[in-house]
Image (spheres, coloured by chain):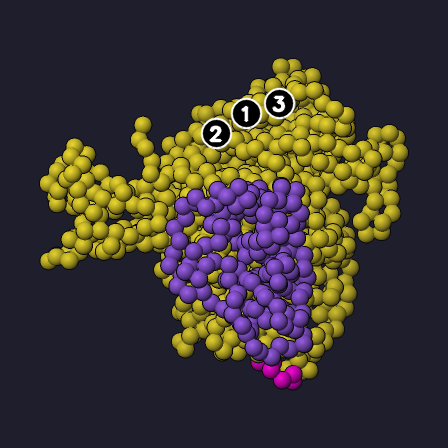
Chain colours: A yellow, B purple
Amino acid sequence: MHEFTAIGKRVPKVDAIDKATGRAQYIQDVKLPGMLYGKILYSKYPHARIVKINTDKAKALPGVRVVLTGDDIPPIRMGVYKDNPPLKSGKVRSYRDEVAAVAAVDLETAKKAIDLIEVTYEALPAVFDPEEAMQSEAPLVHEEHKTNILKMPWKLHYGDVEAAKSESAFQVNDRFTTTWVTHCCMGTSGAIAEFDHSNNLTIYTNTQIPSLAQKDFLETLKALGLKEKRARVIKPYIGGGFGSKLDTYAYEHVCILLAWNARRPVKLTFDREEEFIATSTRQPTITDIAMGCDKDGKLLFRDITMILDNGAYTSWGVTTPSVMMLPISSLYRVPNVRYEAKCVYTNNTYSQAMRGYGNPQATFAIESLMDMLAEKAGIDRVEFRRINSNQPGDVTPQCFKITTCGLPECIDAVADKLNMDAEKEKGVGVGLASLIHVGGGARIYKSDGCGTIIKMDDYGKANVFTGASDMGQGSETVIAQIVAEQLGLKVEDVHVIHQDTDVCPWDVGAHASRTTFVAGNSALCAAIKIKKRLVDLGAEALKVDPKDVVLQDRFIFSKTDRETSMPISKLLRSSHFTHGGQMMMADHFYDPANENLGRDFKGNMSATYSFGAHGVRVKVDEETGKVEILDYVAAHDVGRAINPLLLDGQVYGGVLMGIGYALTEQVVSDKGKNMNPDFRDYKVLTAKDAISLQPVVIETIDEDGPYGAKGIGEPGCVPTAPAIANAIYDAIGVRMKDLPITPERILAALKKKKGVDSCGIDPLTDKEQKCD
Amino acid sequence: NGNQINMTIEDHWTLLHLLREELGLTGAKEGCGSGECGACTVTVDGRAVNSCLYIAAEIEGKKVVTIEGLAARDGGLHPLQKSFVEHGGIQCGYCSPGMIMSSKALLDENPNPNEADIRHALAGNLCRCTGYIPIFESVQAVVDKSAEDIDVVVRDFGPQPD
């Protein structure tokens, strides 16, 4: 077997030294000469007419350069549904609505100026519950749409669900809900916008989608009358992404508008409270789900309706039902499926993409119900999953082509490592849940591609310009490993440049766990082109057959005679510095052979699919309702582990985020107002909450992946909540159907089980609330 | 970081403001501004503090070490820095300067902490990327001295800043 030199090694992140020494510059650390500081004024009401805005006092404050309101700016509409202006005019639809903005010589002055802006509101009736918002008499969030239900009908239907229901030997159904959670990136949002003398824009911003952001910013320039101008997007180091940077936001466009009006660079960064209030959340969902199987435990149908709280505006997150369809139709073999989802406007904060992109919400309902159905059918939970597991070569009824599939191995590994059948003491339980996710890109946009340019220098080093975005997950390192492996270089010889749209090729964005697969393949194909040229040149120089040429350890040599060799650097120079000399460069645009979902929502969305299974052992204290995690096993089919160190990091981080989702994290929203905009009250998990986790890597070597790899960025947080809910049921016999599973909810469920009518403590009133 | 600085400090400055805005030492980060996240951690006379809450005027006559002052003047990384790099203790990196400085304060006080000690010392430093496990491993490796053998390519940093 071929020995790899870079692939499969625990290579430290290539940017880790800069980060360990404090040299890495985040948006907070960037300053430009003459820079002003921007600040945004948010709405005081969840839904109100803006009667009047008086900015006179703010404008008169010394040091203030620009004050803007919604009436001062050209028509700009953000978001996939084009329903969101960066500064609101006429009315506000949520507490996070941007009403006015200021640029001043320093941050203190900008804050003072914001406080001096007087806004007169006329409050309007508001709606905060998506089910109420669907009623005909509900207040309309966007009057022009005439309904709060977005005209995006997510409907997937195949087989005959009604017939399958009547054929099912066992059926269960229930309702599951999830609430708002937020990314909690350690680095807050921010941007710096600057125009040159010819009115071209440079914007430094935290984004996962530099190419699509560039398109959005060009539209804003166009609205300003700057039609043929350029927009250059530069990403500094990003302090965490997790999906939060998958759209452009009001603050970025406001920053551009302020800089344009000030004719000076403007920096606008969020403080932590603003980060909690004015960035988007995961979609809260209400899921009604039914599932049935035959007497042997074979799944016959899934029937699901879902309501998603869209909030007041629409982001890419509105397309999460397309990814929810993946587990709904294709986690296990399901011959008959009906799924309908409605995204509904409310006067709440608007939701967005977050790690897993809808999959955690859907999987919570599916995998909880899998346990309930197994119990009803009298089949062992693990065996039930084995019976229904996907297999390599399956084409699911939604037309997903399962190429490699390590799900059976993942389930076995979890059952084995967790020792699920071991004797249990009181209050201890084990639970299991599986996952399917896109692992080979996800064609949501027109293109799912990524470009790479490789430029070799005269000293044997490679500059790799990639469209991929690294926000901490390590794509730079993985790309460097892939190129180093191909070209016989050391990883440190490969410098990956991904920060600047002026030099980097197009990429749809760092989402859908697609970067290792798509950007990796793109880099691999570009490197193969360079390699071919190096081999041809080397064969000529060494006077050997090209078939016998090997690139390794910075040398090119003959397979048959190791002594016939030359440093790659010398080969590069000799081809460059000669008559008719050539530069060694190559480019490649890789767009996977996946498909957009059709009108019937069928189509092979991803070039391959990632699988996994998580198992957890918990101990539940019936007195306090506290859940303690004793053991956790996370098994993932990753295709190939290109970098086991970074792979483990994705799993560790994903699982802990998933545990927060399951047990502690929530944005407490009182009539649209965020009541806990800080880490402590939001209950993000700390070092004291960290668990002991055993990752298991299953390698299935996917033929379409770079060196066989599939995506792994998101899966770690997908099955965590249902695995824990299943373990809690196993421990104390109560089925937790609402996230987060707080101690209050557990105590309430225990009381309800014992016949006491209480659904826990209302976090807002501190009083017991009755069950509906 | 070993340099004596004479300057006028305004009453309302925090230590974080002094470091980042007045001295240009941007290694310490502001993650929350209210002492919850630890991204701004530096040591004052050997003790880890949240510099966002620390009144700058109170550092008169005291020794402040920031992440910029941790590596040796010849560019050699501190064992903790090496270990965080090697063990995947760093992803997005925003928490790393504070995380490393809290670890430094722990090891200076207690060279042989157990896992509970490490968790306790880092309880005020939030990380959203790593699940903390690689961070514990990074600190543990230094305790076990294995970090001395770590093979990390150290770039030539030249002289260290103030």
Dot 1 corresponds to which residue? A413
Could you tell me what secondary structure mostly forms the magenta stretch?
strand
User: Which range is magenta?
Assistant: A60-69
Say which element carries label 2: strand
Between tags 3 and 2, which lies in front? 3
- Chain letter of the residue carrying label 2: A
Q: Earlier in the sequence, mark 3 or mark 2?
A: 3
Q: Residue B157: which quarter of the image?
A: bottom left
Discs 1 and 2 share one subunit: yes
- Give the answer, above or below, for where A712 lies relative to B20: above
* Whether label 3 touches label 2, CB < 8 Å: no
Q: Is residue A138 magenta?
A: no
Dot 2 corresponds to which residue? A698
Amino acid type indicated by mark 1:
Ala
Q: Earlier in the sequence, mark 1 or mark 3?
A: 1
Residue found farthest to the right: A756
